[in-house]
Image (tube, helix red, strand yellow):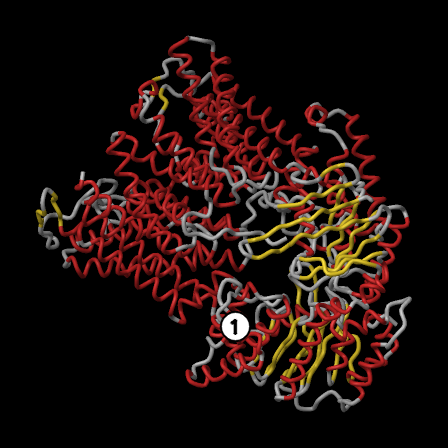
Amino acid sequence: MLFRLDDVQRHFGGVHAVDGVSLEVEQGSIQGLIGPNGAGKTTLVNVTTGYTRMQHGRAFLESDELTGLPAHRIAALGVARTFQNIRLFKDLTAVENVLIGMHTRFRDDTPAQLATLPFFRRGEQQRIREARQLLESVGLPESDANRHAATLPYGAQRRLEIARALALRPRLLILDEPAAGMNPSEKQGIRELIERLNADGLTILLIDHDMRLVMGVCKRVAVLNFGKKIADGTPSEVSTDATVIKAYLGTGGEREVASAPGASGVDEETAVEEAAFARRPAREPEKAILDVRDLTVSYGAVVAVRGASFRVAAGEVLALIGANGAGKSTILNTLSGLVRPESGSAVFDGLDLTSAKASSIVRHGLVQVPEGREILARQTVLENLELATWARRDGAATRRDIESVLKRFGILGERRHLSAGSLSGGEQQMLAIARGLLAKPRLLLLDEPSLGLAPQMVDEVFRAIEEIHQDGTTILLVEQNALRALAIADRAYVIETGRILLSGSGDELLHNPAVRRAYLGG
Amino acid sequence: MDFFFSLFSDPVGFWNSHTLLIAQIGINSMLATSMFLVLYSGQLSLAAPGFMAIGAYTSVLMDLHWHTPLPLNIAAGVVVAGVVGFLVGLPVLRLRGVFLAIATIGFIEALRLGVILNVPITGEGLGLKNPHADPLGGVPIVLLSLAVVVFIVWRLTKGRLGNAWSAIRQDELASLSQGINVARYKMIAFVLSALIAAYAGGLEAHLNFFVDPGDSQYGVTRAVQVLTFAVLGGSGFVLGPVVGALIITLLPYIFEAAGDYINILAGAFLILVIVFRPQGIVGRGGLALVRPAWWPRARVSAVSPG
Amino acid sequence: MDQQIVNALFIGSIYALFAVGYTLVFGILDILNLAHSAVFMLGAAATYTIAITHGQSFWIAAALGIAISAAMGLVIEHVCLRPLRRRQAPPIAALISTIGLALILVAAVEQGRPGTKLSWLWIDGADSVAFPAGTFPNPIWHVGDLTLEASKVVIVPISIALMLVLGYVMRYTQVGRGLRAVAENPRAARLMGLDVDRMITLTLVISSALGGLAGILFGAALGDISPYIGRDNVEVRGLAVIVLGGMGSIPGAVFGGYLLGVIEVLAAVTFGSGVRGGVAFAALFLMLVLRPQGLFGTRLRERL
């Protein structure tokens, strides 16, 4: 038994974030930890690695007790972790990031520094060599070693964070959503990395929402819900457990799990494809309400979008799929007026988006539901909705719309006077969409609506999107969950490294071999 | 402009007639370096004038009452400042950003208004007379000290300590996750900067015949001035704040022609520099004034070829 | 003793009014506007100049003084803050640019002497002046053993009224909700169609108007107007107030202002007036150590 947690508890105010969780991780195994957003997974990790105080319970790493130790001591004892939202040292190069990871392993060199003794240099060279080896071992190319962490592509950043954690030479590696935001081929790469590290003897605790990844790689899986552990067993035991399915997986998720290697059952893709087939295939529209031509957007020296051109016809659902960092969000932010392009044009129903103010764009009917939801956590659900009607001047109609939105998204109606921050991830997504709708959009931009949501919530969100579409709102949907996006879209574009590569109807792309390989896992 | 003319045409004469200015540049540069240390480790501490006061008063009082030799007096001032720095740092270093800045302002003003102005031995509001001051002879020591201090701080930033400080500055939580004892390293930077500030304060006291407890010496005004050295000069590299100190101390001479309106120009200068170069004069990318526009810059692309 | 309490109320009201402007800007922009104390001074100086040097009625002068202070808010936003936001500068840069503006304002008033280019602005240079008796009605009332000057008494209801109005606006009006949205998440606010730049400008204008008004009340009631009244009276005390009350909290600034006034008076009475300055800082220091978020602030938890 390498890692043991005994009855760990942590509450914030009245909320029991972690409510008596016990866990055992076997030496040399990969342990999965899953559960809906807000179930307490990250809090559990924070508590056991010392970032938050444990209010009750104990933690052990082999014979060392971790209870009550400060975070840096726990790290020094051999517990390394990565973070859900990448926390690299942005201003340092990749190599320097890894060198910091080795901090605990070499002694203070102040005297040598002050005397500028050459013997210190040798030690430093040795360490740099080791750092480069670590970078190589996680699959980071040599050319990236001296680049500033902030300039690395998303996938490389995730790998770098793992390399930095490995620099500690840990006994336990905790990975918190290491594959979030990646397309299937990138995820496969991470999966292989995890398996390779484990084959070399490293014990790993893996937290993620991607069922295929978790169930495929882990020896055992523990499931948390509302701070309590509701299941703990092998992947097949857990994925067929009724409570787990009800709380977390939903029917879509169940299918995802069932299609994991080694499992038998319904092939999710076929089922979803059949749904998509029912749509009419569409062509590049003649009359478009949004016309984007040769859009090029840069952040400083980094070109995020290159010469992108596309059109959106009124009433359709257009999907933009591609991996994280491909430029999808940049395009949406440019359309919303938050970012100005270097060149190119974007016209929405007569309004030049490249020069209009963000507030005018919203008033004109182009509304974005941003990635990560960005709701106002400290204000109530109702206040969030009322703010969304800021741009509108029709008092009575506004009240009516707020009421109807609260009715449509029942759960929001129930919680209208609660602070938005107390809602779960999926509920917040609903709030964000509701808020977007209240601005009376003619074109609704949805940026990664399923990101970070439990499979069950993803079902609900896509149901809501479909309803909005039926009501006649034009939708531009950006998603890295290509399967769902293509299934619901009339037309789609595939974007990679800032360029639009393919376009076609949702159905066409769903069957396109290149797309399947890259984004649908073959 | 005559000022610069005489600097280049008659360096020796320049030195002789401007010794106090040169000494002041040296002192300010040391203070700027003290500021650099705390900023480099991610702490917005404005406590330097407080430690200066400790260094100044301790050394002058020892001279007046115990007639001990100067090096001992200054050393004592430095030690006392180190101890006080440690004690103040204990509760204060877990504060972040602006909160730490305000807490350190609280410290220096409480020290100045509460202690110095009320304890008879310090001469209270009238300050202390320092009959053994040596305005001219002190200059070589100041410049030598500056060189040593800058060298030490520079070497520290290059080693394990400096790496830890860099990491802490960028992300304390990530630093913890790599086993770095954030509290300890922050304290080291804080105390070290206190030692340097006290040393500079002690030296400064011995360049003047009078120790003045006013706001422009040891109060918020001075703290803001030292902050400006560092932000204007750029706090990414040891020499940045020194450059900032140099420019700001020389400002009255650069804008000599402005006469009475010097402060107005100084304020405008500050605004212009910070708006057009927020990272400071010696920000990332080297010395802005020195690098010509056609110097090749590395083009970094975020798009990986693979 | 009671006279002291009364004095504490007056000075506390000034502190509170000043601090509200400070905390408003911090709450919405996360920066300390170090030009605020200069605007305080400018409000007083401008009113004095217009009333005395240029012979206008006090009420017109005061109204203009407030207007000029509010206009300074525009200047602060367009010169010191917006250019930095556009360049994604670190927040510390805003400290320096507002310091620069404060330097300019104080120096301009300092240099205003008869015969100089700035004499239209101020002719008393670095000297301290007071409104001559009769500039505005200032009856003195005697209640029990208390001596109450109207100019001081009136500060309290004015301050309280303004703060109630501001509080109401922030909580219940669309504008106030918009300001709170910008304070919490500027990006979300933009995406909801709020004009964030305009909200920020509005914040600076309101904050500066309040700061200038506090200066006018100070100058009128306490009879001290010079280029240094900002620096000497409120610059650093304002910080103590918002720390005590909680950065970004308006009720906190109000409560903190009165609290500081009372603490100072009590300390002066107990330890002698010399300690008055140091007390504010001791209180500030203690608060930061024990409860950094202040009395009314909320704990900011970093999301991991």
CA neighbours of label 1 inside 10 A, class few (<14), some (14 to 19), many (20+): many
Q: Position of residue A499 (x, y in %)?
A: 75, 71
Q: Is residue B170 visible?
A: no
Q: Position of residue B127 (x, y in %)?
A: 33, 23
Horizontal side, residue B161 vs residue C106: left or right:
right
Residue of label 1: C192
- Give the residue at x 50% y 79%: A363
Horizontal side, residue B4 vs residue A31: left or right:
left
Q: Chain of mark 1?
A: C
Q: Position of residue C276 (x, y in %)?
A: 29, 35
The vertical placement of A489 against C122, above or below, is below
Q: Nearer the viewer, residue C167 or B194?
A: C167
Question: Dividing the image into 4 quarters, which one contains the C terminus of chain B?
Answer: bottom right
- Give the residue at x 71% y 29%: A108
Element carrying mark 1: loop
- Give the residue at x 50% y 13%: B72
- Residue type beneath disc 1: Met
Q: Position of residue A360 (x, y in %)?
A: 50, 76
Question: Dividing the image into 4 quarters, which one contains the N terminus of chain B?
Answer: top left
